[in-house]
Amino acid sequence: MPLLSISGLRVRLGGTTVLDGLDMTVGAGEFVGLIGPNGAGKSTLLRAALGLLPHAGTVLLDGVDAATLSARDRAEKAAYLAQEREIAWAVPVETVVALGRAPHQRSFAALGPRDHAIVDEAMRRMDVASFRGRLATELSGGEKARVLTARALAQDTPLLLADEPTAGLDPSHQIALMRVFRELAASGRGVVASLHDLGLAARWCSRIVLVAQGRVIAEGAPAEVLTPERLRAVYGVSAFFAEAGGAPVILPLDLAERVD
Ligand SMILES: Nc1ncnc2c1ncn2[C@@H]1O[C@H](COP(=O)(O)OP(=O)(O)OP(=O)(O)O)[C@@H](O)[C@H]1O
């Protein structure tokens, strides 16, 4: 049973068809890189998958129609890291991360020992434990992004949907994040991350889903999807391709030469 199964997903926003019959499944053990140009529909896909947007078509979370789930039940099945990284509340970092435990708690109950252990582990994984007492509003952009990712990890769900999780992170934290997502997949979770860094996607994801014009136009192993022809056709770039440590290396080099 896939953790996420999307079929015939259609979303219209502002009078425009943004997703046009999109199909996609995510199974346990997968780290899926969702790639595609600006405006392709990646964020829309992630938000519709969580029932945050009106849509046609079917979205099954763990086999259950997402439209029929309560917000709490949905939050037990899937965590979501939004593209926006603002933190509005002037509360300590640890409090923000602990919000990830809310779907698992009875209202206003104190966190139990297991909750604390999960929150601590999420902070450790995102390297924010050392500033757990600082006000979340007073952090740098990348630090805020790591805190919000830790909150999503603390939700401890079978499925994690992350919208540009590496944006604003320095190289070591980007790689650390990719390692965490790969570990989650190895432990039987499913992770979907929209990514613009094709090099990271190629090295760390188990599968790539390429979205353009509201549809999946290619999917499969990174080396199968990320070909010179496709990068030229979809992004209009030429790239350097190599291999290191048993994984692909892809570095976009320049705008592809136009053939008029
Ligand atoms: N509320 C809205 N009203 C009208 N159009 C919208 C709305 N939200 C998004 N869109 C449009 O839907 C399309 C898909 O947007 P979406 O944010 O899903 O793209 P994306 O692939 O995540 O892009 P990016 O890589 O730039 O984050 C874009 O053309 C965008 O302008």
Image (cartoon, rainbow, N blue to C red):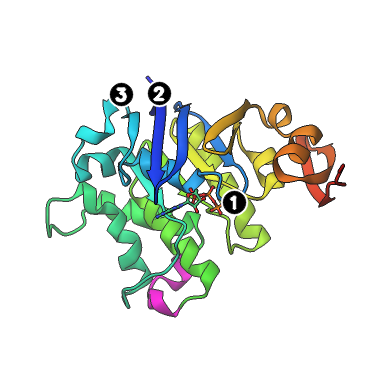
> Disc 2 marks which residue?
2
First in sequence: mark 1 or mark 3?
1
Provide residue 185's location: percent of width, then percent of height.
Answer: 50, 34
Provide residue 180's location: percent of width, then percent of height.
Answer: 53, 46
> Disc 1 marks which residue?
38
Structural crowding at the residue carrying mark 2, measured as other residues with C-alpha within 10 Å and reported as few (<14), some (14–19) or many (≥20): some
Q: Is residue 243 left or right of residue 180?
A: right
In the rendered image, which quarter is residue 234 located in?
top right
Amino acid residing under circle 1: Asn
Mark 2 lies within 8 Å of ligand 1 (Cβ measured): no
**Is 135 contained in the magenta span?**
yes
Mark 1 lies within 8 Å of ligand 1 (Cβ measured): yes
**Front one among 95 and 51:** 51
- Identify the residue shown where x is 60% and y is 59%: 173
Q: For the residue labelled by badge 3, is the local secondary structure a helix, a strand or a loop?
A: loop
- Identify the residue shown where x is 49% and y is 39%: 192
Amino acid residing under circle 2: Pro
What is the magenta range? 128-138
User: Where's the C terminus, which quadrant?
Assistant: top right
Q: For the residue labelled by badge 1, is the local secondary structure a helix, a strand or a loop?
A: loop
Alpha carbon distance from label 1 to label 2: 28 Å
Q: Is residue 59 left or right of residue 186?
A: left
